[in-house]
Image: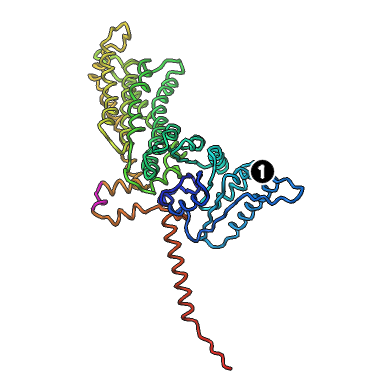
Amino acid sequence: MGPLRFWARGGRLTRLGPKPGLVLTGDKMETAINIRFSCSLLRQGMKQICITATNEATLGQDPEKSVKENILMQITNASQMVKLEKDPHAAFALIIDGKTLTFALEDDMKHQFLNLAVDCASVICCRVSPKQKALVTRLVKEGTGKTTLAIGDGANDVGMIQEADIGVGISGCEGMQAVMASDFAIAQFRFLERLLVVHGHWCYKRIAQMICYFFYKNIAFGLTIFYFEAFAAFSGQSVYVDWYMLLFNVVLTSLPVISLGVFEQDVDSEFPALYQQGPKNLFFDWYRIFGWMGNGLYTSLIIFYLNIIIFYDQAFRAGGQTADMTAVGTVMFTCIIWAVNCQIALTMSHFTWIQHLFVWGSVTTWYVFLVFYGELSSALDENAFKILTEERHRGSTYVETRAVKGKTGNKDRVDSQSRCENQDHHIIQEIKYYRKDIEDRHMWKRERSKARQETKIGLTARVDAKIRHLKGRLQKKYSLMGAPTVIQQT
């Protein structure tokens, strides 16, 4: 029982990181066991623990109480047998029917049942009702504190799908009820591997980077306002025009974030090591969050003080007047727009024409807005009349260039990070960039096999068990052949 619970197709997913083991089915026990043998959730040599309800009540004893005591005794004995097992390769399979599960899910017994299920490599619950499927899923989710995934194809799986953290529905002959109640829908069970390993990795990285970027861009923008408040002795005067602050999150920086959260992809192949980045939380830990916050702090300091130092006592207009607050705020806001959009462009690993349109279109939209805003009647904002033309002719391009230059210095940080941290997606991206996946197939297969974990169920576990069995027989045979022969004389 691991981070995710699902029925593994042929045991392939068992080596990618998620640990399957819990199967909830309405089939009879014999049918369920035969099917699990065919899909490698059960194998020869695996020790099966069958818990059944037997009525052995004596005269004068409550039959229900006797059944509960018998089930509790079976669970206790099975738990002791699993814990006393000394063979590291031993695997246990827990099999329980719906009638027995009714008693095992009661409050005084469910925790012992869960502990036994956690210690087993595979758990099969047969002849269970839709309500029992939901109750078992809730027990696993609340008892282990792990993320649970439920997958089903019929209306009887709706409760289980809705109870799990992540629900996957299969569209097939049994209707669309499971699909409509699920978070994700697939057409065939074999697509589950790509859904988890590829799309699951993309989804995790997109959400993590999008949230961290939200922290960054709002800190970079908001701190410049705070700095000016302190610079102006907390008079309440804002350095930006109200229209600027209104457009920042609504128009000028919203579409690039959407493109990051929808279209970002680092590697489009199935790599177990990339899936492990999610459970290890490599992109959304406190180190990463504080790093983005520090980046926003650094950006705000560079942009604010660079503008203040340059415009503070320098002549800005032809008559020798210094720049007013509107001019300083406009240049400062332009630097912010360039910095945050260049940052998201550096963050992206996969570019399409839509992302180019959103990122650079947001920067262009800002200049288009300044043209129209500056051409409006001076009664709307007298200080902002022809503000774009005035900026372009007064050397503010130098300020924006220096601010963007300081910001794009992060490109060196990104390159050094990929060299120093040497994460898995960096290696894979470099392999695909230099076309090593085509020229050196051996290295490509080696990278794809990294981070595959050992498992006690699945096809690989069955093969390993068969090899160990053959080795044991050969060693026993050789030991008998090499043993000295004792001849007794009479």
Place of residue 122 in the rendered image (x, y in percent of width and height, measured from the top left)? 51, 51
Q: Spot the residue most to the top.
A: 379
> What scheme was used to colour the molecule?
rainbow
State whether the magenta stretch is mostly helix, strand or loop. helix
Q: Residue at x 26, y 34 (%)?
A: 352
Task: Provide the residue designation for mark 1.
Answer: 108
On screen, residue 413 above or below 467: above
Q: Is residue 426 magenta?
A: no
Q: Spot the residue most to the front.
A: 59
Q: Nearer the viewer, residue 182 or 141?
A: 182
On screen, residue 439 above or below 241: below
Q: Nearer the viewer, residue 385 or 306?
A: 385
Q: Quadrant of the C terminus?
A: bottom right
In this rendering, does residue 420 appear at all?
no
> In this picture, which residue range is highlighted in magenta?
433-438
In this rendering, does residue 140 appear at all?
yes
**Three-letter amino acid code at the position of disc 1:** Asp
Place of residue 416 in the rendered image (x, y in percent of width and height, measured from the top left)? 33, 44
